[in-house]
Image (tube, helix red, strand yellow):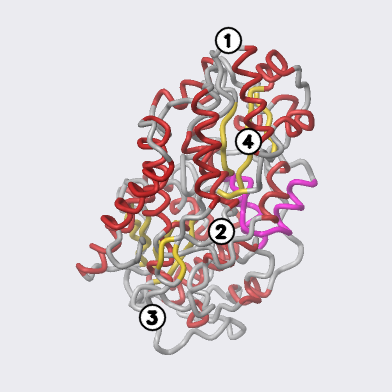
Amino acid sequence: MNTLKKTLALVATLAMAATAFVSCGEDESSSSSSSSESSSESTPAEDSNSESESGDSESEPDAQAGAIDPSVGQGGDTFTVAAWDANDVPYLLAQWKGLDFETVADKLANNEVEGINFISFNVGGGKASENYDQLFNDGGDLDVYFCEADWALKYINDDTKTLALDKLGLTDADFPNIYGYTDTIGLDSNGVRKGISWQAAAGGFAYNARLAEEYLGVTSPDAMQEKVADWSKFVETAKEINEKSGGAAALADSLGGMWQAYACGRTTPWVVDNKLQIDDFCKDFADTAKELWDINGVTKNEQWADEWTAAGTTGNAMGYFVSTWGFGGFFLDAAGGEGGPEYGNWNLVQGPTPYYWGGTWIVVNPATDNGQEARDFIISATSDEAQMKEYAVKKPEYVNNQVVMDELISSNTVFNEKISGNFKDGQNYFAELADNAKQIDFKGLITPYDATIKADFTKIVKEEYLEGGKSWDDAVEAFKDKVAEDITTIDVD
């Protein structure tokens, strides 16, 4: 661990000198030509992370630092971080250690960053859990790892897999300005903080402004929001587009995209008292989806397939449900990339409901032997407002700090010129998501089974109810059977 300790004295200066985005999703790591101002006020977390300017390579952590519990391991030779892909971790490490954003991913992949090992499974986020389980079973080195909302509680509620962050001297005072829904997902069933996110993944509805004017006579985001302000209006607008386009254009990109937004309107957890909950919300979604499906109001494309993004370039999909992390990834592809056929023709509105899509939580392995490094990494990514502000622009990223984001948005920050250039009239796309991020409330709604149950639900709705023409009652029975097959520990009757 001596090698890492030698870097600690340089963290405060190197991290702000870095000159170079996402989550849960596509890579948005294009460098921004914009720069952010450093905050003139340090947070308590910043103060606790500062080292003395003497540069003594063997100096102990600053006396003001939150006390790390003696039970937490220290002094390991390698700080190991694991995630399902390389879209986020390399850049968070670069921000923390003052490394170059442009080269950090390659250097980590080639084991060229001394003292740090990054394990990228190169899979979708939903498949990461299997890899983590194998890693734990094998007893491999692991200090910090990343979890998605839909399955985070599997680990957050397991004290053998996640460390309470107060064991690292971190309390709620270190995270005073995080968005509410991200707070909820980071807590275990006893209200103990086990995870913390550096990003807020609020979503909106992005639409082709050129086509909106042609088919709907809409010339502003405010007017478009009126057309999609709730799901009834969304369906009526889809019918109008279908008629005006001769069936050539669907309002929504995919059933999967629509579900991301719709699901955040649910007010009942999927599992209560160990019993599967199938309420009116489930049928409402299925019926709304069927209305859209039958009139080509939503494309038949599978999310993530090539034809899904291609539909944006041809005008077959007039709009996409997209979250903060997707603007420089799949959504940019849907425009054809910079200079593509629909690049620069888009605007963003809130859509039918506030929602989030994705997001990632940092958790710590209780068996870590690098407690100080884990603490410092978390502070850099989620607590130090100066570093978060810089990261928001460099990555770019919608960071999990309301004060930082409100300041950047109000000053009309250009987070990334290529991404911003995809929006008509220079619309500040993050500004459209700020209210959504603040309205999302998932308290009491997250269960450890969500990833599996939601995937089973949308699969059955599509295959049985939309494509198969089965009755709702038959679809419900098929859904129960599927859940019972996939999760044997809950009651589905």
Which residue bears the numbered disc 3? 74
Q: Nearer the viewer, residue 36 or 138?
A: 138
Asked if labels 4 and 1 touch by Cβ distance under 8 angstroms, the answer is no
Q: Nearer the viewer, mark 2 or mark 3?
A: 2
Precedes in sequence: disc 1 or disc 3:
3
Rendered residue at 37%/81% (across/down): 73
Asked if labels 4 and 2 touch by Cβ distance under 8 angstroms, the answer is no
The magenta segment is 385-410
Which residue bears the numbered disc 2? 198
Find residue 246 and name its label.
Answer: 1
Is 405 contained in the magenta span?
A: yes
Q: Secondary structure at mark 3?
A: loop
Q: Secondary structure at mark 4?
A: strand
Asked if labels 3 and 1 touch by Cβ distance under 8 angstroms, the answer is no
Q: Amino acid at mark 3?
A: Gln
Q: Position of residue 4 (x, y in %)?
A: 41, 69
Precedes in sequence: disc 3 or disc 4:
3
Q: Amino acid at mark 1?
A: Gly
Which residue bears the numbered disc 4? 205
Q: Nearer the viewer, residue 321 or 376?
A: 321
Precedes in sequence: disc 1 or disc 4:
4
Precedes in sequence: disc 2 or disc 3:
3
- Return the residue found at the far left: 138
Q: Nearer the viewer, mark 1 or mark 2?
A: 1
> Is 477 on the left or on the right of 216, as rendered?
left
Indicate the quadrant containing the C terminus: top left, top right, bottom left or bottom right: bottom left
Q: Amino acid at mark 2?
A: Trp
> Is 196 on the left or on the right of 276, as rendered?
right
Residue 25 vs 270, above or below: the answer is above
